[in-house]
Amino acid sequence: MYVKKIAPSLNCGLDLIGEVLYGKWKIRILWFIHEGHLRPSELQRKIPDARRRVLNVQLKELEDHELVTRTIYPVMPPKVEYHLTDFGKTLIPLIRSIGLWGDEHQERLRRVILKQNEMLSLETEISE
């Protein structure tokens, strides 16, 4: 298991939320579990760009941070489902607000992200 080399900075709320939600897919995982996509295979279909191993690691971290719980059903083959904890449910209004902000500003955000990607591509070409 990966162990961070630098101790996390936990001095304020932003540091704390960054530690808990840092990860490319965590916010989307929480949202999709909230929408009822409870099984890892369902999450994989909703987030096809994420590798299964990465999803499993991030689900484990969300579980360690008490935002989701995992239920293993004793059937063959084993069935696993994830559910938001009451603590995890408190994030849903914030995630909804962030998503609405992204929808409201999607054209501008898309433009600046694509511009940044172009600049990085040019820098890579020049350095090669």
Image (cartoon, rainbow, N blue to C red):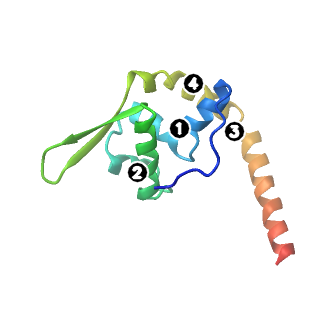
Mark in front: 4 vs 2: 2
Tell me the kind of residue under disc 3. Answer: Gln
The amino acid type of the residue labelled 1 equals Ile
Q: Tag 2: residue type?
A: Asn
Quarter containing the N terminus: bottom left
The residue indicated by pointer 1 is 27
Query: Residue 108 vs residue 52: left or right?
Result: right
Q: 10 Å neighbourhood of mark 2: few (<14), some, or many (≥20)?
A: some
Q: Which residue is pictured at 58% across the width and 37% down the height?
A: 19
Distance of mark 2 from mark 3, alpha carbons?
29 Å
Q: Earlier in the sequence, mark 4 or mark 2?
A: 2
On the image, numbered disc 3 is attached to which residue?
Answer: 106
Q: What residue type is labelled 4?
A: Leu
Residue 85 versus residue 34: which sits nearer the camera?
Answer: 85
Q: Which residue is drawn at 67% across and 25% down?
A: 12
Question: What mark, if any, has residue 71 been given in the picture?
Answer: none
Mark 1 vs mark 3: give the one in front.
1
- The residue to which callout 4 is attached is 94
**What SS does tag 3 mark?**
helix
Q: Where is residue 101 in the image (x, y as percent from the top left)?
A: 66, 29
Marks 1/3: CA–CA distance: 17 Å
